[in-house]
Amino acid sequence: MEIGARIRNLRLARNLTQEELAERADLTKGFISQLERDQTSISVDSLIGILKVLDIKVSDFFKETQPDQVVFNKIERISIAETGAESFELLIPGGADREMEAALVTLEADQQTYPTRPYQGEAFGFVMSGTIQLVFGNDIFSASSGASFYFSGEKEHFIRNAGKRTAEFLWVTTPPTF
């Protein structure tokens, strides 16, 4: 799937110039131009910002599922961001029609997720391997393999790998935010 071409089509359908989209998403026109030609990658935070301007949820942007699908295989996962040390995969593509959304997040040592803007909803997670820290402003909570976490999305937050080995965790949000 070509992310840039889809963004370009959505932008044109909303009668926006690259400059208008860039300004509203707090990005540069040059970045939007490169993105639309698939000459650069995009962070989760920037993608969410662009799609908010375009009034579309990330899960709708990647929607390619059958309406009654129950089982989703590994090959159907959608990688939203892969920066070399971090991967973020949507486990259920097209999750906007559901009450929750699940992602599998992998962080290498000393890596962290992008800060998540506040939203009305909740998040649940389960640490599959490694040790992570959940950072909410000045508050830091640690969780190791086998631990779970649950929090409100009303504060900006991020999760970082606090160990020397790869950390992997399941992250579920309601309503869908990715």
Image: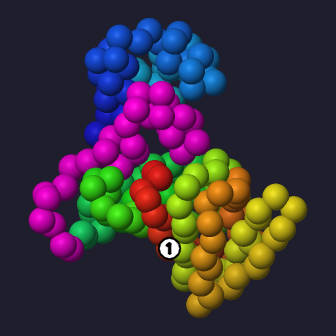
- Rendered location of residue 97, percent (x, y): 27, 56
Question: Which residue corresponds to the image point at 70% horizontal and 56% vertical from the top-left?
Answer: 155
Q: Name the one closer to the observer, 96 or 6.
A: 96
Q: Is residue 57 above or below residue 175?
A: above
Residue numbers of the magenta segment: 43-71
**What type is the residue that disc 1 sits on?**
Leu
Q: Name the one closer to the observer, 84 or 146.
A: 146
Question: Which residue corresponds to the image point at 76% horizontal and 79% vertical from the top-left?
Answer: 142
Do we see residue 177 in this rendering?
A: yes
- Rendered location of residue 126, percent (x, y): 55, 80
Magenta span includes 140: no
Magenta span includes 63: yes
Q: Residue furthest front?
A: 120
Residue 86 in which image quadrant = bottom right
Instruction: Give left or right: position of 133 versus 2.
Output: right
Q: Is residue 25 above or below residue 167?
A: above
Task: Check disc 1 and report the residue beneath it.
Answer: 170
- Rendered location of residue 75, percent (x, y): 27, 63
Question: Which residue corresponds to the image point at 42% horizontal and 57% vertical from the top-left?
Answer: 176
Residue 71 in which image quadrant = bottom left
Q: Is residue 27 above or below residue 172?
A: above
Determine the secondary structure under disc 1: strand
